[in-house]
Image (tube, rainbow, N blue to C red):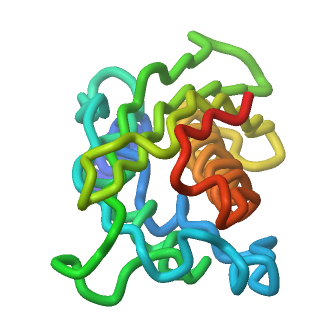
Amino acid sequence: MKTAIQKAAAILGLALLSACASPAEFQNMVVTEGIDTAATQNSAFKDSIVVKSVDGGEETNPMWTSEISSQAFEKALIASLENAQLLAKLDENAPYRLRVTLLEVDQPLFGLDLTVKTRVRYEIIEKDSDKTVFSEEIPATHTATFGDSPFAIQRLRLANEGSAKNNIAAFIERVIAVSPEMSGENVALK
């Protein structure tokens, strides 16, 4: 009888732990594929960007929903820029500063397929002139399905991570597309 109660308590404890929200993990938001490294070679921003600030993220409350923290997004962004050959080797010599604001993380309350939409503002500022040379709000989405995880709380985390990763990938794609002639202008690709 005592063993059955202990087993039931253990199962209940595991069920409660699996129901706790966990934050988006930076390594799942890093862009590792689909980067046009040949185009990067001609980019105005090759090896020249340093991340100055990332704001607007939220910490996860384990009893509520998964969120994307500013710190996790920043780490994923830095790793992604490095993969795309856009990150400066030395921060102090970087000609461009990147300022990022997570404006929106739109999450569903419930459902089998959970789609998260992120909207992020990216601003690249030239160090010497303090002039904004790129400014754009980028939206992105990602859907996590029941096939990805039977637990809604985990599907939401996966949707958060996928949307953030897609957002960073869209930013990198736009930055690589900026021609060297345009880098001195205020570029807002809409």
Q: Is any atom of residue 163 visible in this view?
A: yes
Q: What residue is rendered at 75% in x and 74% in y? A: 35
At horizontal 36% and vertical 44% (from top left) the residue drawn is 23
Specify the farthest residue to the left. 92
Between 185 and 23, the one nearer to me in the picture: 185
In the image, 156 versus 38, the foreground residue is 38
User: Quarter of the image holding residue 140?
Assistant: top right
Rendered location of residue 18, percent (x, y)? 43, 44
Q: Residue at x 66, y 73 (%)?
A: 43
How many marks the image carries: the answer is 0
Depth order, front residue of 28/54:
54
Question: In the visual, does 88 lie left or right of 186?
Answer: left
Q: Quadrant of the C terminus?
A: top right
Please name the residue shown 56% across and 83% down the image.
85
Q: Percent x, y for residue 1?
A: 30, 46
Q: Is residue 21 above or below residue 43?
A: above
Left or right of 119 in this view: 102: left
Would you identify the image quadrant in which residue 55 lies?
top left
**Direction top: furthest residue:** 109
The answer to whether any part of residue 5 appears in the image is no
Q: Is residue 50 above or below residue 7?
A: below
Q: Position of residue 188 (x, y in %)?
A: 62, 33
- Along the viewing direction, whichever of 168 and 162 lies nearer the viewer: 168
On the image, the x and y values in percent for residue 172 come to 64, 59
